């Protein structure tokens, strides 16, 4: 397809900085079908079923006029994929209408039967070449559909495509007034809040003047805000493709809470899926599609998961069938439970971290340093049970340090690394080169929660570490975490909450303290229920211990999970659900999350 070929010619850095990603026909229809096309097709089928010919003819003529009056806007149209496919879909529906109107007769004296035109389609695009490609793509589509209409009416039609009008404007859509249309659609640029250039940040500030935490919003959020502003007092409906970050973590409260307060509601949505292209150079981005409006809903709300539609009562900002509740970031736990934090953050340039063979080679030169080496676990090392090793010299007396020249070289290298850093805080750390930027070394055993874990796992694999082991800032640590805490955290209830509230890296879970843990509503179990959870939590650890040579990655692969471990988790899930007074028979994950959100709201209002 011509537009895909255009985008594949752009170098990766141009695509990344502009947030450009390819669009397959299948993915376009995930958006345009529920936005308007399904409704139009259903209306056509209803008209086609009318048995009284005179009434059917009048309705078909009115339907064709309706098709010709609809207007569509893609305010980040790129090379025109959405506009082109929408035009083709509308024209094919019009051809079916024409076919029914004239029953395949040769029409010699009625002129051009086509009413739908590319003049109904508007686009805004900042790239000048893309504008040219989009116009050309629409002209090619117009010519293609003209041929299909000729097959319907059995006659040649007079057509010169380059005289037709394509409303594609070259401009920054965030600084341009948008035309008033019936539908807004597209996939605006996917640029994260921390990846934007200066001009893009200026755009965000212009679109969100005075908004709380606007600096933490992704660039695509600007299109949601501008579309919502245009909707006020109209029947305009919109649907946009976004990275799934706009429906996760703090972005939900930052973006959707003010929009909902302004009257916006979500009409349909596709939960996270992989957005693939048809281009030669593949782009894989994990996206959501959100259809929204201010006008009253005329159809049931539909929530798609893995393309399976479900009629729901409401779709909130997390794309869950639950009330419009917003879980806002907090610094302390909502309930009376231990605080957790990140592990150690050295900011050492890697000079204190070693693979096993690197440590062995170092100790051959400096055997006295052995007592200052500790196993080092980040999320990857913990899940795969492949520790690195950390040379931690903060507690080494100066007289010993001066006798270890290899250690002194590492200390000096860290000092130089910090001095060259652009951050004044890091430069200040150069004064104490044996200290970490963040130090978190609990006494005794502690619970470890990997920050990032694969979405393919039913449970984030958590576990215990002893104080001789150091963990990096890629894990979360609960000092003195009890078996009860472990059982709750490893339960299906907590996992359901985590999957809804957490941020994602691509589609993998990213466990955050302030969003996921601190906002989690814990149960208030009886002594008997708490004892049962402690028992089932220990059973999980015992089941793991049956396979000492298997890593957590092995044990929590859904294909290779041992039956003993699966059963232990199932028993723990039941024990935790009973502590919440949840029904074991009919409590689905979506119902569980909806109930947890209600609990959260009650508890948050008490704070």
Image: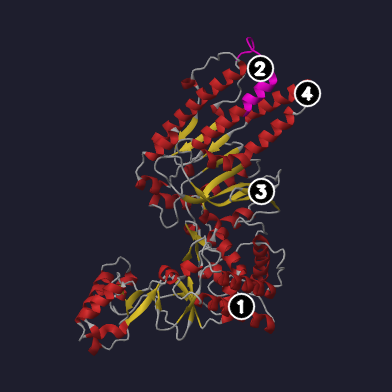
Q: Secondary structure at mark 2?
A: loop
Q: Nearer the viewer, mark 1 or mark 4?
A: 1
Instruction: Give me the disc on residue 94.
Output: none
Which residue is the site of mark 1?
536
Mark 1 and mark 4 residues within 8 Å of each other at the beta carbon:
no
Q: CA distance from mark 3 to mark 2?
A: 37 Å
Q: Secondary structure at mark 1?
A: helix
**Is residue 68 shown in magenta?**
no
Graded by Cα atoms within 10 Å as few (under 14), some (14 to 19) or many (20 or more), the crowding at tag 1 reads: many
Tag 3 or tag 1, which sits nearer the N-term? 3
Tag 2 or tag 3, which sits nearer the N-term? 2
Q: CA distance from mark 1 to mark 3?
A: 38 Å
- State whether residue 391 appears in this view: yes
Q: CA distance from mark 4 to mark 2?
A: 19 Å
In which quadrant of the rendered view does residue 38 lie?
Answer: top right
Q: Secondary structure at mark 4?
A: helix
Which residue is the site of mark 2?
104
Can you give x and y, in whole percent of width and height, for residue 223 in the image? 52, 47
**Is residue 110 shown in magenta?**
yes
Is residue 595 depicted above or below 185 in this figure? below
The magenta segment is 93-111
Q: Nearer the viewer, mark 1 or mark 3?
A: 1
Lateral position of residue 548 relative to residue 488, left or right: left
Which residue is the site of mark 4?
55
Which residue is the site of mark 3?
302
Image point 64% across, 83% down: which residue? 531
Can you give x and y, in whole percent of width and height, for residue 71 in the image? 59, 33
Tag 2 or tag 1, which sits nearer the N-term? 2
Q: Quadrant of the N terminus?
A: top left
């Amino acid at each position: 397809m011509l537009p895909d070929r255009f985008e594949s010619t752009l170098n990766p850095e141009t695509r990344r900085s502009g947030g450009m990603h390819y669009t397959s026909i299948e993915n376009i229809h995930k958006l345009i079908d529920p936005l308007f096309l399904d409704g139009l097709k259903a209306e056509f089928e209803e008209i086609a079923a009318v048995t009284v010919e005179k009434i059917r003819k009048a309705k078909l003529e009115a339907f064709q006029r309706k098709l010709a009056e609809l207007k569509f806007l893609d305010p980040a149209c790129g090379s025109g994929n959405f506009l082109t496919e929408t035009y083709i879909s509308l024209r094919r529906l019009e051809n079916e209408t024409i076919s029914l109107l004239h029953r395949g007769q040769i029409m010699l004296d009625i002129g051009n039967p086509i009413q739908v035109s590319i003049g109904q389609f508007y686009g805004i695009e900042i790239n000048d070449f893309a504008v040219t490609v989009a116009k050309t793509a629409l002209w090619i589509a117009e010519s293609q559909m003209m041929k299909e209409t000729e097959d319907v009416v059995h006659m040649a039609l007079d057509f010169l495509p380059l005289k037709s009008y394509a409303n594609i404007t070259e401009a920054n859509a965030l600084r341009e007034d948008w035309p008033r249309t019936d539908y807004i659609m597209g996939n605006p640029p996917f640029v994260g809040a921390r990846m934007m250039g200066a001009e893009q940040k200026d755009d965000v500030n212009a679109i969100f003047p005075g908004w709380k935490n606007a600096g933490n919003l992704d660039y695509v959020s600007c299109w949601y805000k501008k579309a919502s502003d245009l909707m006020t007092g109209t029947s305009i409906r919109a649907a946009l493709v976004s990275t799934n970050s706009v429906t996760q973590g703090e972005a939900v409260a930052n973006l959707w809470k003010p929009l909902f307060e302004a009257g916006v509601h979500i009409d349909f949505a596709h939960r996270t899926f992989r957005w693939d292209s048809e281009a030669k150079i593949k782009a894989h981005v994990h996206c959501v599609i959100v259809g929204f409006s201010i006008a009253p809903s005329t159809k049931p709300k539909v929530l798609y998961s893995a393309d399976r539609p479900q009629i729901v009562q409401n779709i909130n900002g997390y794309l869950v069938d639950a009330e419009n509740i917003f879980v806002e970031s907090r610094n302390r736990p909502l309930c009376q439970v231990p605080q957790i934090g990140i592990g150690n953050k050295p900011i050492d340039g890697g000079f204190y971290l070693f693979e096993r063979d690197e440590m062995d080679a170092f100790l051959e030169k400096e055997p006295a340093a052995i007592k200052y080496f500790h196993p080092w676990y980040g999320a990857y090392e913990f899940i795969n049970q492949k520790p690195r090793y950390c040379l931690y010299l903060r507690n080494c007396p100066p007289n010993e340090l001066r006798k270890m020249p290899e250690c002194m070289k590492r200390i000096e290298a860290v000092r130089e690394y910090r001095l060259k850093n652009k951050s004044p805080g890091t430069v200040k750390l150069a004064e104490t080169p044996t200290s970490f930027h963040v130090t978190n070394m609990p006494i005794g055993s502690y619970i470890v929660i990997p920050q990032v874990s694969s979405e393919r796992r039913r449970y984030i694999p958590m576990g215990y570490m002893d104080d001789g082991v150091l963990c990096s800032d890629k894990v979360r640590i609960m000092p003195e975490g009890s078996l009860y805490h472990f059982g709750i955290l490893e339960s299906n209830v907590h996992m359901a909450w985590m999957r809804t509230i957490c941020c994602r890296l691509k589609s993998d879970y990213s466990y955050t303290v302030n969003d996921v843990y601190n906002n989690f509503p814990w149960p208030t179990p009886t002594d008997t229920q708490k004892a049962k959870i402690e028992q089932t939590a220990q059973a999980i650890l015992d089941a793991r211990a049956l396979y000492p040579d298997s890593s957590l990655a092995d044990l929590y692969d859904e294909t290779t999970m041992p039956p003993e471990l699966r059963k232990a988790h199932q028993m723990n899930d039941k024990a935790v659900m009973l502590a919440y007074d949840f029904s074991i028979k009919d409590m689905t994950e979506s119902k569980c999350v909806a109930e947890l959100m209600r609990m959260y709201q009650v508890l948050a209002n008490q704070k």
